[in-house]
Image (cartoon, grey):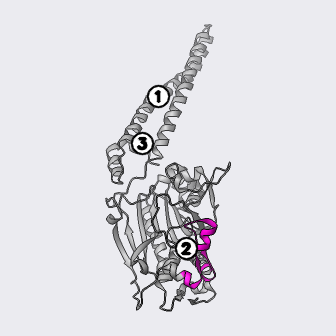
């Protein structure tokens, strides 16, 4: 959530940055300004009446000491108390409307984010690796997986519908190997603490990370009286680990990694990536989350992005890093790097991780703060998150980049210890 004080004091800057994200905020900003004006009208009156009420006790004492009847003072106090109560109700309603409106605003882009309206305006930062060359026409992963007997969409469709898959035999083993490999690298080599969070969360948790209230159509809600949702990403429960806590700043940054299944309705993606594992309702992901101070958050974003890239480098998968433009960033992000892996069947790079700094946007919603020296004034942390990596898309990249002319797939060396020594997947 945006800082209401910053919005009030910098209306032109806020409007310009929101417009750079492709929205017209003029009506909502006008409504917000009206609520702020009402708040500034009511708040001083409440505070003044409370001061008068506190001083009234002294007036009663003086009246009694002088032998005067204090009943008029008591009556005045009663009327003033009723007025205070009414104004506090009005102020609470104003604050609720202001906060509800602020929850619909996306984060402001960092000044280093390039202006743009679509993915075509994103900026390539770097590349690693060389896409493989083949003496044959490379197959897409859905054909490779089906021929190897490790990937079954038809049976998944019969039991759950479109955008689901069943991994069989070596396919399931490869997926599990990727999860274990990623967690091991991040926990042992990169210094993250491994977490196994709930796979369902409540409405407050989703509001804290920015999925609610704006994107409820993208979520799967549990039926019945449960106010619970299946998680769209481990970012949600892991970021909410420290909801409404004050952290010791001397311990920052805190770094967590978690494997979870993820569940998304893919609302608005009709007709996109209808074949294969690219866009599923259920998929596996290893997530990276950091809690940092404002001063260190952009250095930590670079480190987090490198930690995700290191997985692809160890697997020998070519990739590029893209700096997203203002119009292509996620709702909560202030700055995002996308990591895109090479897919031979599409002759292009496809996103496999988004690494974002949300600055204090999520922390303000979830009230996550820190004290720099362990004591003193508490201030909001900065939160960062990124995929390290999306397991299904990594599996796709391995199948397609390591395919052989006979239809087999070579297992990357880094994964062989997690595959009981298997070096090739054959039909």
Residue at the location (42% across, 90% down)?
Answer: 136
Magenta residues, as a range?
Answer: 145-172
Mark 1: few/some/many CA within 10 Å (<14, 14-19, 20+) = some
The residue nearer to you, when weighing 321 against 48, is: 321
N-terminal label among 2 and 1: 1
Q: Which residue is mark 3?
A: 5
Apparent side of residue 402 relative to residue 160 in the rendered image (left or right): left
Q: Residue at x 59, y 13 (%)?
A: 75
How far across and down, in percent of the image, does residue 352 sit? 47, 71
Residue 148 is covered by the magenta coloring: yes
The residue sitting at the right extreme is 225
Q: Is residue 380 visible?
A: no
Residue bearing the label numbered 1: 42
Residues tagged 1 and 3 counted as in contact (Cβ below 8 A): no
Q: Which residue is mark 2?
A: 186
From the viewer's perspective, is residue 83 above or below residue 346? Answer: above
Residue shown at 40% from the left, 82% from the top: 129
Q: Tell me the number on the disc at residue 374.
A: none
Q: Identify which residue, 204 or 213, lies in the foreground.
A: 213
| Mark 3 surroundings: few (<14), some (14-19) or many (≥20) residues within 10 A | few
Residue 369 shown left or right of residue 169 in the figure: left
């Amino acid at each position: 959530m945006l800082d209401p004080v910053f919005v009030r004091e910098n209306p032109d800057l806020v409007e310009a940055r929101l417009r750079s994200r492709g929205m017209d905020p003029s009506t909502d900003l006008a409504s917000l300004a009206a609520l702020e004006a009402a708040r500034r009208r009511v708040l001083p009156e409440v505070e003044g009446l409370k001061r008068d009420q506190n001083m009234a006790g002294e007036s009663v004492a003086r009246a009694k000491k002088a032998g005067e009847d204090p009943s008029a003072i008591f009556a005045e106090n009663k009327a003033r108390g009723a007025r205070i109560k009414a104004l506090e109700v009005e102020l609470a309603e104003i604050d609720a409307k202001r906060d509800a409106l602020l929850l619909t605003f996306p984060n402001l882009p960092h000044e280093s984010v390039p202006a743009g309206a679509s993915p075509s305006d994103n900026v390539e930062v770097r590349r690693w690796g060389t896409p493989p060359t083949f003496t044959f026409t490379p197959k897409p992963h859905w054909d490779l997986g089906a021929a190897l007997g490790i990937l079954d969409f038809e049976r998944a469709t019969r039991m759950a519908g479109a955008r689901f898959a069943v991994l069989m035999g070596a396919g399931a083993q490869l997926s599990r190997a990727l999860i274990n490999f990623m967690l091991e690298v991040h926990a042992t080599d990169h210094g993250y603490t491994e977490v196994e969070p709930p796979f369902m969360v409540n409405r407050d948790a989703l509001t804290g990370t920015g999925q609610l209230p704006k994107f409820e159509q993208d979520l799967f809600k549990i039926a019945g009286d449960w106010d619970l949702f299946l998680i769209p990403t481990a970012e949600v429960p892991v970021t909410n680990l420290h909801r409404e806590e004050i952290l010791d700043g001397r311990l920052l940054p805190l770094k967590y990694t978690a494997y979870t299944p993820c569940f998304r309705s893919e609302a608005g993606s009709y007709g996109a990536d209808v074949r294969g594992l690219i866009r599923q309702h259920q998929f596996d992901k290893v997530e990276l989350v950091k809690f940092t101070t404002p001063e260190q958050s952009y250095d930590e974003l670079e480190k987090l992005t490198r930690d995700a890239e290191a997985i692809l480098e160890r697997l020998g998968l070519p990739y590029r890093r893209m700096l997203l433009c203002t119009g292509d960033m996620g709702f909560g992000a202030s700055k995002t790097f996308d990591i895109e892996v090479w897919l031979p069947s599409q002759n292009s790079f496809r996103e496999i991780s988004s690494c974002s700094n949300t600055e204090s946007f999520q922390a303000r919603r979830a009230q996550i703060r820190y004290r720099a020296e362990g004591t003193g004034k508490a201030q909001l942390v900065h939160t960062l998150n990124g995929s390290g990596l999306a397991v299904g898309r990594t599996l796709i990249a391995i199948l397609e980049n390591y395919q052989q002319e006979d239809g087999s797939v070579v297992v990357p060396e880094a994964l062989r210890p997690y595959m009981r020594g298997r070096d090739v997947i054959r039909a």
